[in-house]
Amino acid sequence: MGHVSFLCKLRSPYVNNAEKYLRKIRYILSELELVRSLKTSPCLSTTEDAAKDCPVSRIRNFSIIAHVDHGKSTLADRLLEITGAIGHDSGNQVLDKLQVEKERGITVKAQTASLNYHYVGDRKIPQGQYLLNLIDTPGHVDFSGEVSRSLLACQGALLIVDANKGVQAQTAANYRLAITKGLTIIPVINKIDLKNADPERVYGQLKTLFDIDKNSVLKVSAKHGDGVEDVLKAIVKRIPSPPARLREPFRGLLFDSWFDRHRGAVLLLYIHDGSLSVGDQITSVNSGRSYEVKSLGMLRPQEEAHQTLSAGQVGYMTCNMRSPSEVCIGDTFHKKDEAVEQLPDLKKATPLVFAGIYPNDQSQYLALRSALEKLVLNDSTVSMVPDSSPALGQGWRLGFLGLLHMEVFGQRLEQEYGAEPVITAPSVTYKAKIMGAKNIKKYGKDEISFSNPTHFPDVQIISELYEPIVTATIITPDVYMGSIISLCVDRRGVQISSVNIDDERVMLQFSMPLNEIIVDFHDLIKSVSSGYASFDYETSGYAPSKLVKVNILLNGNIVEELSTICHVSKSARVGYQLCTKLKDLIPRQLFQVAVQASVGSKVVARENIKALRKDVTAKCYGGDISRKMKLLKRQAEGKKKMRMIGNIEVPKHTFISVLKR
């Protein structure tokens, strides 16, 4: 108390601010208590020794999951501040490090931080120092692969729900994902400081949808820090320690990676069993290749080097792995010449949206390939195969989990690697059933998949076409239910169910074709509901569909690169939109150009590009009218002949404008 009286004497002139300075005194005392506890706790005082000697029973691995903008990153900031990982003036959303995350205000990449926390509370739980490995995950459906991968290294999850908005579509999806992986869920109602916050209503929603007991729910204000200390205590009390065994042979699970220009591939490992030290020789189960461990460490959230990582811990590793192609997310590592059982592999996310990526100029091909390989290392949910286009040259066909995923990937290419690629309009993967023994032998199978319209098979050899179907979940206030149902029906949706969450909100489920929702459906949902509805979807296989290929013809000649695939009921609308756009983009010729959209031999839309006309009668200053008529007739004959033999050169920028989203 000597420190207290000394500080009080210093502040004696400011009696009116006594409460303010009393809080400061309490904070200093808590810091002194923390230093004292670090010296006497079972884990040693230095962070490296603490990480090395901390028993598995005092480790907690957990993730933060929620819908977009429910306060995950803000809560992560408070957890980092309370545990001393960052200062109180470090800024907002510390774990959102990417420029695209700061610009868009969303998390797109899961981030890890290892925290030291001194637990004082329930006597049933051993008090002292604990190691908390936190993983902050994205909330948008397009980045569900990041969430699924992060949960592999966790035994529990904080489920954050906004006290004002309540349970949203992605809240339900993330809850189901965590439950299927056997994680302990700690429900947290955030933003209780808001004027319109209604925690009681959110309690009811959690009970109705997830059967969560009200007594297990925590209430916090991540912005002001209220109740965050209770969250840390709940993590220690409720989440089990990892099922790791220190005395067993080393097994490590690779669940994330990124590229460093000096060190090559940096791997994020969950140490399932045993221990790993710098200099050890390790082997990949997936590739069979062996590597020497060059460096190890933890993220706190900045990199902190360690000589050893032990069972239950999460940390980064660098080795002599230079090629991004050697990295396989979900891979198991073990020490060389030690036989171990492979850990459960991560189920690879299936890309839903495909787009072509091409360099603006073919001289930039190698630079773009290098940038793509490094970025795909950081985002393993993206699939990448070489592709080519007569109009755009050599490139790649990339698969994404959604439209926002595609947009963010393109933005990161530009910001992090200075690339300026041409990204074509998104499409989905279709399937076709082939008939005829000769045709089946030609393709090597009776069912083929394709995402590029140029690979659409001949209709004469197809017995049936299939398109991907998703189960869409929409949570909306009931006043907008009619507009949303009309929108879904217009997009060929079939209603599955309707559940009242409370007196004001309803959860709708529709079975919908994926190609109807990948471009603008999410924006339209927000528009018709004034921003109050939320949308999420899950894949549910393929279904038969009447699909057609819409061809574009210029003066009767098919331009294959401009073709597209759509449902037969929308072929006329799609054809008209393409023809109207091309009419404005294709330069005028010396003869009339007919722009047509056709399905098979039937023309469904047409636009005409008028010819450039030279005034051949300008030099005639009078005289007989027959002279002018003769010149006009000769001009008409020349244009007719030119139309028969002339070639239409479509500039590259026209293809880019049509193909680019």
Image (spheres, rainbow, N blue to C red):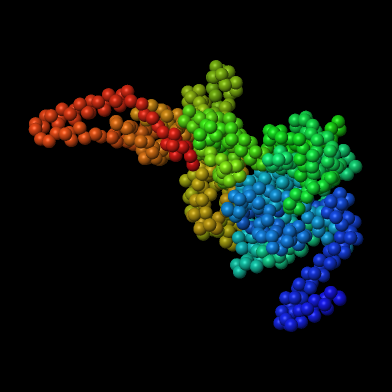
Q: Choose between 525 and 618: the one closer to the eye.
A: 618
Question: Is 497 drawn above or below residue 651 in the view shown?
Answer: below
Q: Position of residue 29 (x, y in %)?
A: 82, 70
Q: Is residue 48 left or right of residue 633?
A: right
Question: Among all residues in the image, which is located at the extreme left?
Answer: 623
Q: Choose between 315 and 13: the one closer to the eye.
A: 13
Instruction: Residue 339: name its quadrant.
Output: top right
Residue drawn at x 84%, y 38% as measured from the top left: 279
Residue drawn at x 65%, y 41% as measured from the top left: 379
Residue drawn at x 20%, y 26% as measured from the top left: 634
Instruction: Residue 401: name its quadrant.
Output: top right
Quadrant housing the N terminus: bottom right
Question: Is 537 drawn above or below residue 35 in the view shown?
Answer: above
Q: Choose between 647 and 417: the one closer to the eye.
A: 417
Q: Can residue 416 be seen in this snapshot? A: yes
The tally of labels here is 0
Q: Position of residue 310 (x, y in %)?
A: 85, 45
Residue drawn at x 16%, y 34% as measured from the top left: 619
Q: Position of residue 45 (x, y in %)?
A: 87, 57
Q: Can residue 452 be seen in this snapshot? A: no
Q: Is residue 64 left or right of residue 607?
A: right
Q: Position of residue 177 (x, y in %)?
A: 69, 47
